[in-house]
Amino acid sequence: MRALVRSQTGGLETYDLKADFELPALDEGQVQVKVFTTSVNPIDSVRRKMMLTMIGGPPDAFPVVDGYDICGEVVAVGPGAEKFPVGQKVFGNIQRQPNKPQQFGAWAEYANVYEDTIAAMPEGLDHASAGCAGVTFGTSIEAVETADPASTRSVLVTGGAGGVGSAMVQVAKHILKSEFIAATASTSKVEEVLRIGANKVVDYKTTDFINALEGNKFDFILDSVGEGDKCLALLAEDGKYVQLTGAAVTDPRATFLFHGGKTHYYEKLSPYLASGKIKPIIHEVVPFSEYKRAIELAESGGTMGKIVMEVAP
């Protein structure tokens, strides 16, 4: 099978798109999935640069296949796997522990996947959307589970145009039913973040959001860019601050989150994805053979939403 194989730490030159890579036998509780689509996430770059060791992860045992997000179809069922029959379409984040990812991930034509990290793909959801929903929307659902859902009337999202940020804005609007959603974004992306559900978007290129939002105290803050001190200044006394990057904040209201795939996150999302009430924001769908361009686009910081790689039509 084709697989994007990496045999060392470094830049994009460390990848080799092999035509004849073989996966090991299925482990207990795994299914084999034919991959339709996957996506590029910041943590893929962190892993490639061996920075997972800074957050408790072990060094990679080479060779590795990166990739967290998956959309595909079950083609084989391993010992002890009972949830998904052959032919079932699935989606999710196949890495149970994001800082300790399995050796062979989703950037390949087939992936061996623990079935407790995926869910049945909702009817009507397209492959591109399903292939980038796992990490972003899963992170958002896991983040809000750290808070009291009844106390999320006001929500602040930093990095509202990114994959997780745009997912969190939609989760706040459609699942939490938050009354006031604020977000930060760069100039060219302000209107899109308003369109997907934010009530107020601060252009961080021209305005310091702590000044623009002065007088507000938020019940829940998801920080995807590492603005801990500013966020805490805007957090309600009994609020919840969830941090995804940057130096960990020392505050009893704060949680540093690494999202690991779990079926129930995606099952909770499924009816909203099926109805179209929430939808991953996709910047571009790139053929698997153009993986270098896909990764470069994702790492450029200039995109709105996700970069999806189409592995199979």
Image (cartoon, rainbow, N blue to C red):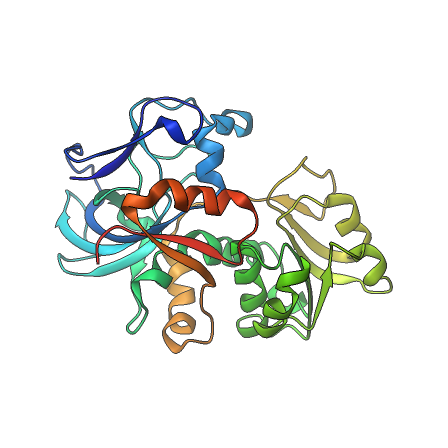
Placement of 13 over or under 92, stated as above or below? above
Placement of 60 over or under 162, stated as above or below? above
Quarter of the rendering containing residue 110: top left
Which corner quadrant holds the C terminus? bottom left
The picture places residue 156, in percent across and down from the top left corner, at 69, 61
Q: Is residue 177 left or right of residue 105?
A: right
Which corner quadrant holds the N terminus? top left
Q: How many labels does the image show?
A: 0
The picture places residue 124, in percent across and down from the top left corner, at 30, 74
Looking at the picture, tell me which residue is in the foreground, 3 or 287.
Answer: 287
Task: Give the residue at x 34% y 61%.
Answer: 128
The picture places residue 85, in percent across and down from the top left corner, at 15, 58
Looking at the picture, tell me which residue is in the foreground, 188 or 74.
Answer: 188
Q: In this view, does 85 lie to the left or right of 134?
A: left
Is residue 133 visible in this depiction of the protein?
Answer: no
Quarter of the rendering containing residue 235: bottom right
The picture places residue 236, in percent across and down from the top left corner, at 78, 59
Placement of 177 over or under 129, stated as above or below? below
Looking at the picture, tell me which residue is in the foreground, 22 or 222.
Answer: 22
Is residue 79 visible in this depiction of the protein?
Answer: yes
